[in-house]
Image (spheres, rainbow, N blue to C red):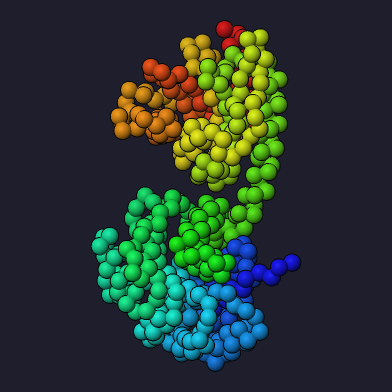
Amino acid sequence: MKSLPCVLTIAGSDSGGGAGIQADLKAISMAGCYGATAITALTAQNTTGVTGIEAVSSEFVALQIETVCSDIKVHAAKTGMLFSASIIRSVAAALQDKNFPLVIDPVCVATSGAKLLKEDAVEAMKSLFSLADLLTPNVPEAELFTGIEIKTREDVFKVIDILLDMGPKAVLIKGGHFDSVAATDWLGIKGQQPIPLMQQRVKTKNSHGTGCTLSATIASNLAKGYDMHAAVRKAQEYLNLALRAGFDIGEGSGPPNHLAPMLIEKMKQKLLSDHYECGIRLSRMEGLHKLIPEMRMNVAAALPYAAYIEEVSAFSGRITSTRKGEVIVCGRPDFGASLHLAKSLICVRKYNPEVGCAATLRNNAEITSAIASCGFVEAWFDREDESTDLKGSEAASIEWGTCKAISEHPEPEMVDVVCDSGEKGKEPIIRLLAKDFADLELKLEQILAALTEM
C-alpha cells in the first residue's frame, strides 16, 4: 500500500480524549494521513474541566520533534497547546528550517475555561507566528494577540492585517464566538482581500476540541496537496458534520464525533437498501394510487444529523400509477434525487429532529378529511403569503412554506402533515411526515383505511 502523508502534531495531551493530541490524531487519521506527535504537556481533564497540568521540559519537546523529523518525512505540522515561553522557543528553534506547511492554533483557553497558556508565553507565541503558513485564532485569542475588540466586520479586517504583519502567510479568524445565525470564519491571505467562509451553525453543547480538530484537518489537507482555501473549506465541512454527529459523554461538553464520515458512509448504504425495500412494499400497497398526486409521489429519507440535500435520499424517478391503479416506483433511491422534498424535510427536522421520512400526497377534500379522521396534526401554508422574491424558485417556495407552517404551529414537534393549498399552475400537495419507513407506511395505511370507511 502507498504510504500516507505524515502530519506532525505538537500539542498537549487531553486525558479525556476530546481535544489536544487525542483529537488531532483522530482527525488526522480520518483525513487519510499518518499522525506523529510531540507532546508538550500532560493534562488531567475530563468534559467538565482541567484539574492539573504537567509540562514536558522544553528540551524534550524539541527532542521529540527532531527525532520524528530525522526519520519520517513530515508533509505538514500543526501546533496546539504550547503552554510556556520556554516550550514555544524550543518549538520555534526545532522548526526554524522546516520544509513543510505549518498550522499554528494559538491555544490559550480550554472550552471549559481553564488557561492553557501562561501569561509570559503570550509574547513568545507572537514570535512563533512568522513560521506559520496559517494562524487559526478564535475571536478571544485574536483580541488577546492584537489588543483590539472584535465587534464588526471592519474589526475583523483590522485584526487580520495586524496578525499578518506578525509574519504568518495566512490567518483564519474562527467565527464560533460571533453572535450570528451562520458560523462564519474569515480567511485572510497576504495580498488578498479577506473572504468569509460560512457554515451552518450547529446547536450543540458538545464542542470540546473543535479548534484542535479544525487545525489538524487543515494541516492534513495541506499535507495532501490542497491549496489553503480548499484545505480550510474541506476542514470546515468535516468539522460541521462531526459537530452535527456529536454525542454526550461525561457531564460536561463532549467532543465532535471524529468518526462521523465513516459512520455516515455505512449508514448511507443501509438507508438506500431500506429505502429500496420500502419502494417494493409501497408498490404492493392496496389503494395507494388514490394518494398519488398528478405530479407523482416521492418518498424522502434523511440520514441521522442530515442538514444538506445530499444527505437526503429519494426515488430518482418518483412514484406513479397506471389508469388501472398499478403503482410503479420509477428509478432507485439516491441521495440528492429530490431537491423540493429534501428541502422540506430538512426544514421540518430543524423543529423536530425525530422526523426522518416524508412523502408527497394528493391534496383534496376527501384525503384531508381522511387525514383529520386519523387524528393527524396538520400545519398549513398559503402561497398567497409568499414574498414575490421567492416566486421564481419552486424549491425556495416549498422551503419557505414548510418553515412557515411548522414554525407558526403551536406544537411544531407534533405535526404529522404539512399541507400546501397550491395556486394557479401549482398542484395542492400534502407532505406526510414520519419517524422512519415503518412509521410512514403505517400512516399511509391509516389514511387509506379512513378513505375506505368514508
- Compare residues 401 and 43 and report the one nearer the observer: 401
Q: Quadrant of residue 57?
A: bottom right
Residue 216 in view: no
For the C terminus, the image quarter is top right
Vertical relation: 82 (above or below) 405: below
- Compare residues 294 and 15 and report the one nearer the observer: 294
Q: How many marks?
A: 0
The residue located at (35%, 71%) in the rendering is 190
Residue 286 x/y as whole percent: 68, 15
For the N terminus, the image quarter is bottom right
**Is 188 on the left or on the right of 453, as rendered?**
left
Return the residue found at the far top. 454
- Compare residues 327 and 52 and report the one nearer the observer: 327
**Is 33 on the left or on the right of 416, as rendered?**
right
Q: Quadrant of residue 124?
A: bottom left
Return the residue found at the far bottom. 59
Residue 52 x/y as whole percent: 52, 79
Residue 70 x/y as whole percent: 63, 86
Vertical relation: 273 (above or below) 68: above
The residue located at (66%, 69%) in the rendering is 4
The residue located at (33%, 69%) in the rendering is 191
Return the residue found at the far right. 1
Residue 13 x/y as whole percent: 57, 76
